[in-house]
Image (cartoon, rainbow, N blue to C red):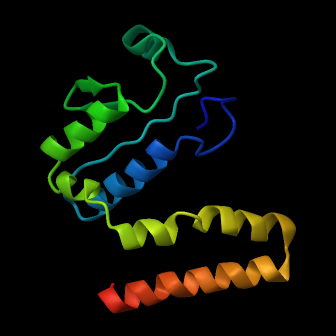
């Protein structure tokens, strides 16, 4: 949840991206994954005791707490089976998905046919890439 107001979902892009990657590894049975959400406006006492004013994301692996984004990335890369693959940047994929969310949001908010056509064309390009790669 959002550290901005405790109500918005998915405000942290770092959390979203790595949750999806770690969830994939869990689906492949490479790792075991447990996600715990915390209301930062009213964190539970044990959270306050252990992490004071630290904002999410926090990764806990076998009792070791990692609190900074870069350290979380390094830990995943070195310690999580298959984790090193999460940080290989595919430029073609990155450019295709870069503006997908904003286009989808415009279609949902404005319901404009031109925006819908733009989104469909974008999704078609993503579909083409997946087909070329056999995924």
In the rendered image, residue 50, in percent from the top left (x then y), is placed at 37, 12
Q: Residue at x 70, y 80 (%)?
A: 118
Question: Up-down: is 2 above or below 28?
Answer: above
Left or right of 47: which side holds 22? left
Name the foreground residue: 52 vs 71: 71
The answer to which quarter of the image holds residue 69 is top left
Q: Residue at x 62, y 63 (%)?
A: 101
In the rendered image, residue 111, in percent from the top left (x then y), is placed at 85, 73
Question: Up-down: is 39 above or below 24?
Answer: above
Left or right of 69: which side holds 40? right
In the rendered image, residue 96, in percent from the top left (x then y), is placed at 49, 72
The N terminus - image quarter = top right
Q: Residue at x 50, y 68 (%)?
A: 97
The C terminus - image quarter = bottom left
Name the foreground residue: 68 vs 30: 68
Q: Residue at x 21, y 59 (%)?
A: 85
Name the foreground residue: 44 vs 132: 132
Q: How many marks?
A: 0
């Amino acid at each position: 949840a959002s550290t901005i107001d405790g109500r918005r979902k998915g405000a942290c892009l770092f959390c979203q991206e790595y949750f999806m990657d770690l969830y994939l590894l869990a689906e492949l049975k490479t790792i075991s994954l447990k996600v715990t959400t915390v209301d930062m406006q009213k964190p539970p006492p044990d959270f306050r005791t252990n992490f004071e004013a630290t904002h999410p994301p926090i990764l806990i692996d076998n009792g070791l707490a990692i609190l900074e984004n870069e350290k979380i990335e390094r830990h995943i890369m070195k310690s999580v089976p298959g984790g090193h693959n999460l940080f290989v940047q595919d430029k073609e994929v990155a450019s295709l998905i870069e503006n997908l969310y904003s286009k989808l949001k415009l279609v949902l908010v404005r319901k404009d046919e031109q925006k819908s056509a733009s989104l469909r064309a974008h999704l078609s390009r993503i579909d083409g890439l997946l087909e070329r790669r056999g995924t």
